[in-house]
Every structure is written in structure tokens, then in C-alpha cells.
């Protein structure tokens, strides 16, 4: 990576965005946008809607840390900015919160179910587009759940406690989403989370590269 980075702001035109650290291009939904607040603090814009020119980074904890430590944000803004030391943790927490919100929307819209038996029924009936399995759940149980449908995207970013909050139950280990926009968005958020999660240990299983598109069908 070059120490003399070109203009780090993305022009935010066209279908792709360029990472200010790696200079690689990617889909906006799978990258992370940052903006500089009026008080000159760098803040994550996970929904890519905040005003101001965006600084885009690849969804990687290492990339975020490089940007924080190497002055990428200041060069992009062409002024001194405040970069929080916990910026990566802010992004990770924000992405987890967004996944919980999406699951909540799916539940209220009748586009999700929970519990091993109900989820397994959706899998066998090919109603499930995405499986959500608690990060502290059993790998063997997951194997039984997706038996015969191992090409299904599996999200393992949320704990059983997180899922219980979404579904209003004491504990939830398994859930499924039907095909649609919410399932597609959940897959995209999980891809971003997978790169940013501390050590990556909380995401045990990756899903197909086209998981976002597959879940939306």
C-alpha cells in the first residue's frame, strides 16, 4: 500500500466505491462509509445517509485500524480530525445492532420464524432463504438444521441472548428468514460484520459469495 494516497474521498458516483486505504472498489452495500461531523469527529455512517462527502473503507478491522493510525481520515478531510480509538468497536456494535433491527422487522412482517423444529420445517419446504444460528449455539445442531440444504446462507453473528431479545423469548438458537429484501440486507450486514468483528471469532461459518443475491430471490 502506498504511503502517498491519492484523494481519499470517494466521488460517490456510479455503482462502486473505492476504499481509501486499499484503493480497491466494492459495492456500497458491502463497504463502510465514514463522515466527518461538524465538530470534526470521524463517525461511521453505516446507512450511508449522513450529509457530507464520504470516506469509504473495505469492511475489515485491519483496514479501519490502518486508516485510524495512518492519518487517512485527516488527509481525506484536509484538516485535523478526531478519530476515536474505539472506531472499529463502534462499527462492530453498529452492525450487530442493525442485524438485530432487520431480524425484528422480519419477525413483525411475518417473514421469519424461530425454534429448531419450525426452522427445520422451513428448510425442508424450501421456504428459508437465510438461516440465523446463535454464535454460542452448537455446530452439530446447525449441521442437522441445514442437512440437505448446505448451500443456504448462515448468519452466526448474534448470540442466543441477542436473538431472544428480537423474538421475545427466553432463549433462541435458530431462526430463518424468507426470501426478500430483509433477508438480502441481513446477509450484506453479516458480510460487513464478518470482516470487522474482533478477531473474526464470532463468525464461524461463511456463506456463499452470492449470499446477498441468493437471499433476495
Image (cartoon, helix red, strand yellow):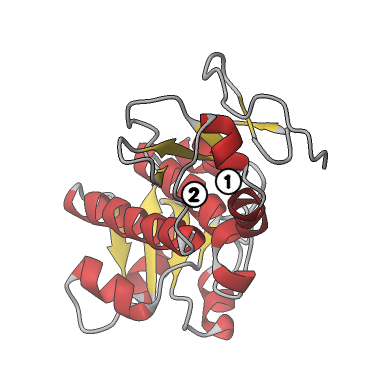
Residue contact between numbered discs 2 and 1, judged by CB atoms under 8 Å: yes
Q: Residue furthest right?
A: 2
Residue 39 seen in this snapshot: yes
In this picture, is 166 found above or below 193? below
Instruction: Give the image quarter of residue 204.
Output: bottom right
Apparent side of residue 121 relative to residue 140 in the rendered image (left or right): left
Q: Secondary structure at mark 2?
A: helix
Residue appearing at x 63%, y 53% in the figure: 60
Apparent side of residue 144 relative to residue 132 in the rendered image (left or right): right
Instruction: Give the image quarter of residue 107.
Output: bottom left
Q: Position of residue 46 (x, y in %)?
A: 40, 43
Apparent side of residue 10 relative to residue 162 in the rendered image (left or right): right
Q: Position of residue 206 (x, y in %)?
A: 64, 60
- Image quadrant for the N terminus? top right
Which of disc 1 and disc 2 is earlier in sequence? Answer: 2
Residue appearing at x 56%, y 14% in the figure: 14
According to the picture, the residue beneath numbered tag 1 turns out to be: 211
Please tell me which residue lies in front, 201 or 132. Answer: 201
Amino acid at each position: 500500500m502506498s504511503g502517498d494516497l491519492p484523494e481519499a474521498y470517494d466521488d460517490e458516483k456510479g455503482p462502486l466505491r473505492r476504499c481509501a486505504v486499499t484503493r480497491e472498489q466494492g459495492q456500497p452495500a458491502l463497504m463502510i462509509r465514514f463522515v466527518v461531523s461538524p465538530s470534526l469527529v470521524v463517525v461511521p455512517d453505516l446507512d450511508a445517509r449522513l450529509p457530507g462527502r464520504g470516506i469509504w473503507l473495505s469492511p475489515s478491522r485491519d483496514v479501519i485500524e490502518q486508516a485510524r493510525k495512518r492519518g487517512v481520515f485527516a488527509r481525506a478531510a484536509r484538516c485535523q480530525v478526531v478519530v476515536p480509538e474505539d472506531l472499529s468497536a463502534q462499527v462492530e456494535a453498529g452492525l450487530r445492532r442493525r442485524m438485530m433491527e432487520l431480524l425484528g422487522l422480519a419477525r413483525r412482517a411475518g417473514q421469519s420464524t424461530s425454534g429448531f423444529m419450525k426452522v427445520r420445517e422451513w428448510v425442508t419446504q424450501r421456504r428459508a432463504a437465510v438461516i440465523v444460528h446463535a454464535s454460542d449455539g452448537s455446530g452439530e445442531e446447525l449441521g442437522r438444521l441445514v442437512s440437505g440444504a448446505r448451500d443456504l446462507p448462515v448468519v452466526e453473528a448474534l448470540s442466543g441472548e441477542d436473538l431472544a431479545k428480537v423474538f421475545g423469548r427466553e432463549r433462541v438458537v435458530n431462526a430463518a428468514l424468507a426470501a426478500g429484501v430483509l433477508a438480502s440486507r441481513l446477509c450484506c450486514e453479516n458480510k460487513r460484520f464478518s470482516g470487522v468483528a474482533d478477531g473474526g471469532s464470532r463468525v464461524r461459518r461463511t456463506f456463499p459469495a452470492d449470499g446477498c443475491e441468493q437471499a433476495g430471490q
